[in-house]
Image: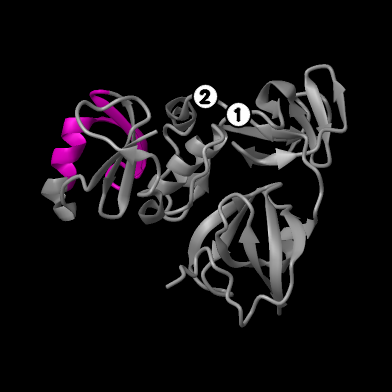
Amino acid sequence: MSDPRQTPDPAVATLADPAQIILPVVDLCRTASGPRDRQLLYGETITILHRTAGWSYVQAAKDGYCGYIPANSHAAFGTATHFVSAAATHAYARADFKSPDLTSLSFASRLSVTATIGAFAQTSLGFIPRAHLAPLPQAAQDPAAIAALFLGTPYLWGGNSRWGIDCSGLVQAALLACGIPCPGDSDMQLDLGQKAEGPYKRNDLLFWKGHVALVTDPETLIHANAHAMAVTHEPVKAAISRIETQGDGPVTAHRRF
């Protein structure tokens, strides 16, 4: 049976129009006006599959996830030249950090740079510090280092941004930044890499029922967790014991790339 999260509904999907997200963060909802399943970031590419009153049924290019987003959250497809490589950044009214900030963008947001003025890049949103941007295409090499950018980020069910993220959103952000394909939810991420045994290694994935964490060293992991309601480092043994004690069971899988 096909998974509706990644399989467009044939009864609804009548279009195939490319577009991109034009708001900093947009909820990708299960139904029009329904609950959030995931989020999309500024500049992400989507395919519009259907339009209804105030909503668009879309499929995300990064992972194939399908859902509904507000009709005012996207526009015609444009070509991005850079992505936000810092945890977050601001767009300013002028090429001056003392000028008014116009909006904020999360890590992995994509945008087009039209000019550079000193330490700033000019974009349609305003002027962004060049130190916070990297050219496309460019892939990082260490998922755990990307995950560490999100330390302290509040836990948010279905979140995918620096303003709020969940366990699978954190793993997806880390892997996609390194050019590793990664679906959006932890149950789908169970198929990533290969089954691993023995001592934990950096960038291994550990799974529990409904939860995933990324190993940073043989004794430590990083994860977005509801216990701390944030992205935190935690000793592996302590996390395994705590999660089992609170009733969520033992580790169900150990995967390695």
Name which residue lies at 51% across and 57% down.
38
Q: Residues within 10 Å of mark 1 (few under 14, many from 20)?
A: some
Mark 2 highlights which residue? 141
Q: CA distance from mark 2 to mark 1?
A: 7 Å
Which mark is drawn over residue 147?
none
Quadrant in the picture for the C terminus: top left
**Regarding mark 1 in the picture, which secondary structure is present there?**
loop
221 relative to 87 in the view: left or right: left
Name which residue lies at 80% across and 53% down.
77
Q: What amino acid type is highlighted by mark number 2? A: Gln
Q: Position of residue 68 (x, y in %)?
A: 60, 68
Q: State whether residue 93 is above or below residue 182.
A: above
Q: State whether residue 180 is above or below residue 40.
A: above
Task: Using the rendered view, name the quadrant where residue 236 is placed.
Answer: top left
Residue at the extreme top:
118
Quadrant in the picture for the N terminus: bottom left
Q: Are marks 2 and 1 in contact (CB under 8 Å)?
A: yes
**Magenta region includes residue 230:** yes
User: Residue 54: in sight, yes or no?
Assistant: no
- Per the rendered image, the range of residues in magenta is 218-243
Name which residue lies at 69% across and 27% down.
133
Name which residue lies at 45% across and 32% down.
147
Q: Residues within 10 Å of mark 2 (few under 14, many from 20)?
A: some
Which mark is drawn over residue 139?
1
